[in-house]
Amino acid sequence: STKSTTQLQISNLLNNMQPPSQQPQLPKDVKEAVSKCREAVQKSLENRLSRMDIEFPVGTKFGVEKNSGSAKKRGRKLASAVDDPSESGITKDLLDTSDRELARLFVEMFQPVGGQAITVVFSDNSLADAAQQKWKGDAGAECRVVSTTRGKKRKSVLKGMGGPKKTKKKKGFAAKMNDEFSDETSGPFKLPENCEVAIFVAPTAKDLITVDRICKDVGMGTLVILLNARLDLVDNFGSEEMKDFFFDEFEKVFYLSIAPQDAAPGCLMHRSYPNDWIVARKPKIGQPKTIGTFDQRPGEDECREAFDRIEVTDVEKGVENVLENVATWLN
């Protein structure tokens, strides 16, 4: 089909990276994490996966917005996860910025299909408006920005926004009412026409119901990506069928978060498709040390067994502080 051919083209255009390491390891910094994520997406596209789940540490600072000018001069090197070591609090603004920056990276990643074919979906209008403002005039961020919240029509972030403005014709009352209650702004949320890549940014539990419906509507020909959905933390999917859908149909293409803390305190879990899952412990000094490798996502029992195999002298106290913001180890 045309869409499957397009996905193959995306795959080929993204294929400008080093082959994945034979032995999976945790990325040493944000730049490497993003590179590994791109590799994983590339491999997923090659294998015709059209449902992807991507999860980065809470509050990761990608440096896309703050250091956008200097980043370009350095070949788009990303800032470390934590610029200020004294900053330990995680605010809503920090979370929103992190999610938006990750979305911006994915929009640029899929630019080969064209901005009109990419739709970025936020959970409310304020988040979508913020993205519109931040990405305005950015050639690498061409896409359609929408929200699952019904509201006013939203312009696409596309080229030519700085061109001459067209003179708007005055509309009569009937025309205004038709616009106000048109299908674009009322009824169940739906993706714009000709959408080939749909990126849902930090969807809420309510949004997941919409994602489920959208997936059924568009079929496997449309690539659907979840960014920081954090499915493990969703308390209620509404039904077991819905829960099974997300855990069975969506491949965890890139995952970097904490391991079950009751079983493996102070440990992280990582997976970069198509490599194995790994569990690693963060010492006070130095990079995380892998303590277990698994071909399937490990449960609490496997994590506990891996943790129990660590030498007693190798277990350090105080690592729990890292869990306040897992991203702090990406320095």
Image: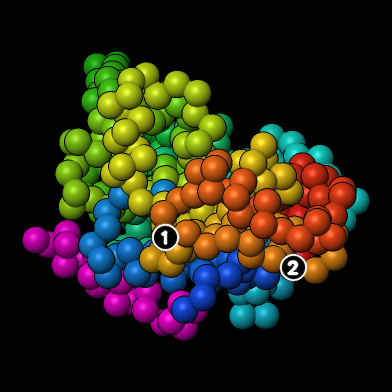
Residue 298, position as x, y percentages in the image? 49, 49
Circle 2 or circle 1, nearest the eye = 1
Answer whether residue 85 is magenta in the image. no
Of 180 and 32, which appears nearest the observer? 32
Label 1 SS: loop
Q: Position of residue 236 (x, y in %)?
A: 45, 21
Magenta residues: mostly which secondary structure?
A: helix
Q: Residue furthest right?
A: 86
What is the C-alpha distance between the residues marked 2 and 1? 23 Å
Q: Residues within 10 Å of mark 1 (few under 14, many from 20)?
A: few
Residue furthest left as drawn? 1
- Front residue of 21/155: it is 21
- Residue 131 placement: quadrant: top right
Residue 154 % position (x, y):
41, 37
Specify the segment rendered in magenta: 1-21
Q: Earlier in the sequence, mark 2 or mark 1?
A: 2
Q: Which mark is residue 176?
A: none
Q: Residue at x 45, y 51 (%)?
A: 297
Residue at x 54%, y 32% (from the top left corner) = 233
* Residue type highlighted by circle 1: Asp
Number of residues whose C-alpha sits closer than 10 Å to that of mark 2, classed few (under 14), some (14–19) or many (20 or more): some
Q: Does residue 192 lie above or below 84 as drawn?
A: above
- Find disc 2 in the rendering and name its residue: 287
Q: Residue at x 17, y 62 (%)?
A: 4
| Amino acid identity at mark 2 | Gln
Q: Which residue is mark 1?
A: 295
